[in-house]
Image (cartoon, rainbow, N blue to C red):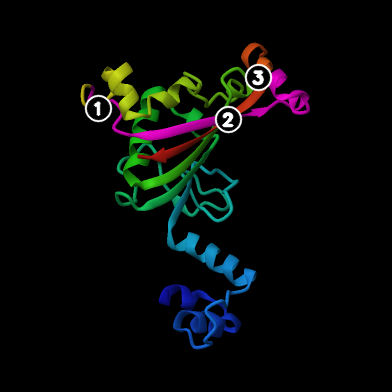
């Protein structure tokens, strides 16, 4: 609290201090919304939230990480050089927007293992990639094979690997997965189908090329 108190603008400090020590004598006193928002933003700075492979479009409020010094990049880091410069369990959130497809399959294994190492228990990663059935996955010559598909997310669960693909786990394969994530995912829909009802969208994504443009997944560290 002392560190947060020091971060509050001078005009707000007396209110935060009074709430902390109860000098007003009114337990119902709540800091105005602008103070709450300000403290929330400051808390994000005190906690490591990383935008990996951010390029020149860093996510607002995140620490930009890239191998190139684009505008907005805060940390120069080659994600294929391990270990990364963050301690075990020190990161509360990771954002990966159109970066994972630039790595090969074996490289992705190492990257997700390293993400797992630096993330706190219960921390979240949001990973977006071009949909494998969209030409967006193939136009960039730096994209690597194979394209990311929904099936990949199952392999990030330790219990699923143990039952279905034990040879992909580090217990049996020195180059295998050491991570354990609970993954969910959804899609960005082509503008032509955005106004359609959900059944038409599901049909299109299953049978029509280009119906889905991106896959966005959420990983929670278990």
| Spatial separation of the CA atoms under disc 1 and disc 2 | 28 Å
User: Residue, x 28% and y 22% (percent of image)?
Assistant: 162
Answer whether labels 2 and 3 touch (C-beta < 8 Å).
Answer: no
Number of other residues with Cα within 10 Å of mark 3, as a class: few under 14, some 14 to 19, many 20 or more: some
Ranked by sequence position, the earlier of labels 2 and 3 is 2
Closest to the observer: 213 or 189? Answer: 189
182 is within the stretch colored magenta:
yes
**From the viewer's perspective, is 140 left or right of 203?**
left
User: What's drawn in magenta, residue-wise?
Assistant: 173-201
Q: Are circles 1 and 3 on residues that touch, CB within 8 Å?
A: no
Q: Report the front residue among 57 and 192.
A: 192
Q: Quadrant of the N terminus?
A: bottom left
Secondary element at image label 3: helix
Q: Which residue is mark 1?
A: 170
Q: Is residue 176 above or below residue 9?
A: above
Q: Nearer the viewer, mark 1 or mark 3?
A: 3
In x, y percent, where is residue 61? Answer: 55, 56
Gap between marks 2 and 3, in whole Å? Answer: 11 Å
Residue bearing mark 3:
202
Residue 149: % across, % down:
50, 21
Q: Residue at x 39, y 51 (%)?
A: 91
- SS of the residue under disc 1: loop
Residue lying at 60% horizontally and 83% vertically, measured from the top left = 11
Label 1 close to label 2 by CB (< 8 Å): no
Kindly identify which numbered label has been placed on residue 9: none
User: 84 or 71: nearer the eye?
Assistant: 84
Mark 1 or mark 3: name the one nearer the start of the chain. Answer: 1
Residue 128 horizontal side relative to residue 125, left or right: right
Mark 1 or 2, closer to the camera: 2
Q: Nearer the viewer, residue 22 or 64?
A: 22
Category of crowding for the residue at label 1, using alpha-carbon neighbours closer than 10 angstroms: few (below 14), some (14–19), many (at least 20) = some
Q: Which residue is mark 2?
A: 186
């Amino acid at each position: 609290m002392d560190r947060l108190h020091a971060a509050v603008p001078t005009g707000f400090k007396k209110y935060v201090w009074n709430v902390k020590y109860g000098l007003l004598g009114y337990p119902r006193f709540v800091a105005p919304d602008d103070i709450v928002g300000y403290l929330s933003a400051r808390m994000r700075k005190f906690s490591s939230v990383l935008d990996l492979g951010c390029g020149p479009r860093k996510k607002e409020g995140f620490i930009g990480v890239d191998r190139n010094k684009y505008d907005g990049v805060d940390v120069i880091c080659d994600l294929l050089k391990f270990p990364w410069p963050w301690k075990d369990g020190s990161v509360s959130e990771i954002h990966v927007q159109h970066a994972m497809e630039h790595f090969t399959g074996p490289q992705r294994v190492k990257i997700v293992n390293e993400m797992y190492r630096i993330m706190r228990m219960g921390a979240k990663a949001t990973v977006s990639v071009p949909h494998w059935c969209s030409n967006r996955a193939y136009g960039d010559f730096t994209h690597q094979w194979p394209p990311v598909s929904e099936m990949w997310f199952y392999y990030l669960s330790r219990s699923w690997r143990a039952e279905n693909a034990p040879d992909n786990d580090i217990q049996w394969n020195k180059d295998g997965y050491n991570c354990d994530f609970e993954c969910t995912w959804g899609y960005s829909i082509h503008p032509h189908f955005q106004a359609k009802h959900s059944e038409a969208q599901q049909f299109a994504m299953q049978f029509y090329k280009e119906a889905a443009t991106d896959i966005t997944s959420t990983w929670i560290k278990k």
